[in-house]
Image (spheres, helix red, strand yellow):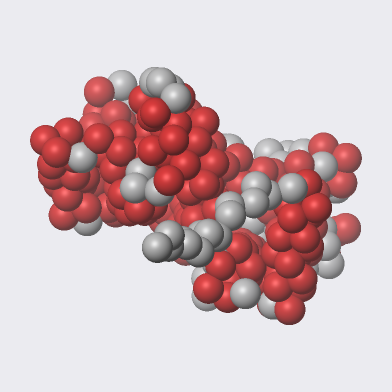
Amino acid sequence: MATTVAPGPIAIPATDDDVRIERHGVWKRFRRHRLALVGAVVIALVTIVAFSAKLLAPADPNFIDQANWSGYPLAPGVAHHILGTDENGRDLLSRLMYGGQISLTVAFFAVLMELSIGTVIGAISGYYGGWIDYVLMRITDVFLSIPLLPLLLVLTAIVAASSNKAALGFGVIVVIIGGTSWPAVARLVRASFLSLREKEFCEAARALGNRDGRIIFRHLLPNAVAPIIVQGTLEVANVIILESTLSFLGFGIQPPTASWGNMLANAESNMAIAPWVAIFPGLCILVTVLAINYLGDGLRDAIDPNMK
């Protein structure tokens, strides 16, 4: 007697309409996160103002208003200085704009370097496994076991001692922060690859004769890009705080170049007589970091398939 076997489910490939529906769903979930929308608007405004500083700034950031300055910071609104001046008679609003440009640029390039290193290490570790995974993850554990801020201080001090303190410019800070902050990204990508490498599409790619490099970067990495984007967004806020902390301690961007961190450091001696010199850069850091964190939370909730 012949037996019949019920046919299994037929896999239907995703169409362009399916992709558009999914993108619409991500945007719909993101819109529900009101704080994330506010954060996105705030970040856009801060970025536009910072990178339009040459057009919008009322004065050169290093210009000393000797005609009105008498050795002490000018109060907000005095002598056409909307937010006042710093301890050297330089327009505070202009320095905030140019300082935001430096802080955001350092954060962007440091996070780009951090994501690049962490993604490559995590992808190789998660895809190959075995002794390669063991060695790479033990190196990652070493970096994770060292407190990041003391490590950054030691590295910047070594650079300063080997040349001079003025050498601590934009490129050095980016390399130091980006080159030491990748372990969290590596672990995130490794976890994604450990799951993705067992999927049917990965087995099919191997069966078709694709090389490991193509499978990693063409097939697996696009499926792991969502958590990487969210992690990168949150890391921008962390890097802004790290750069501000280094500059505040004297090991970041060096004067006369303005950054929010070294503006806070220079304001320390005048807090009692001119609190606005510290309040305004502190508010810039606070608002920007909060906005980025809210944006990251919104992206995580929108992209996470468990939130559908």
Q: Residue at coordinates 67% horizontally, 43% vertically from top-left? A: 101
Query: Residue 174 occupies which quadrant of the picture?
Result: top left
Percent from the top left, x then y, of residue 305?
A: 56, 67
In the rendered structure, the answer to whether residue 293 lies left or right of residue 44 reads left
Q: Quadrant of the C terminus?
A: bottom right
In the rendered structure, the answer to whether residue 174 lies left or right of residue 102 reads left
Q: Residue at coordinates 70% horizontally, 73% vertically from top-left? A: 29
Percent from the top left, x then y, of residue 287?
A: 64, 69
Up-down: is 246 above or below 210? below
Residue sitting at the far front:
1
Up-down: is 167 above or below 219? above
Q: Residue at coordinates 45% horizontally, 31% vertically from top-left? A: 205
Percent from the top left, x then y, of residue 97?
A: 72, 49
Q: Is residue 234 visible?
A: no
Q: Residue at coordinates 49% horizontally, 55% vertically from top-left? A: 227
Up-down: is 10 above or below 29? above
Q: How many marks?
A: 0
In this rendered view, identify the residue nearer to me: 265 or 282: 282
In the rendered structure, the answer to whether residue 100 lies left or right of residue 120 reads right
Q: Is residue 125 visible?
A: yes
Percent from the top left, x then y, of residue 152?
A: 29, 45
In this rendered view, identify the residue nearer to me: 297 or 293: 297
In this rendered view, identify the residue nearer to me: 239 or 202: 202
In this rendered view, identify the residue nearer to me: 41 or 164: 41
Q: Quadrant of the N terminus?
A: bottom left
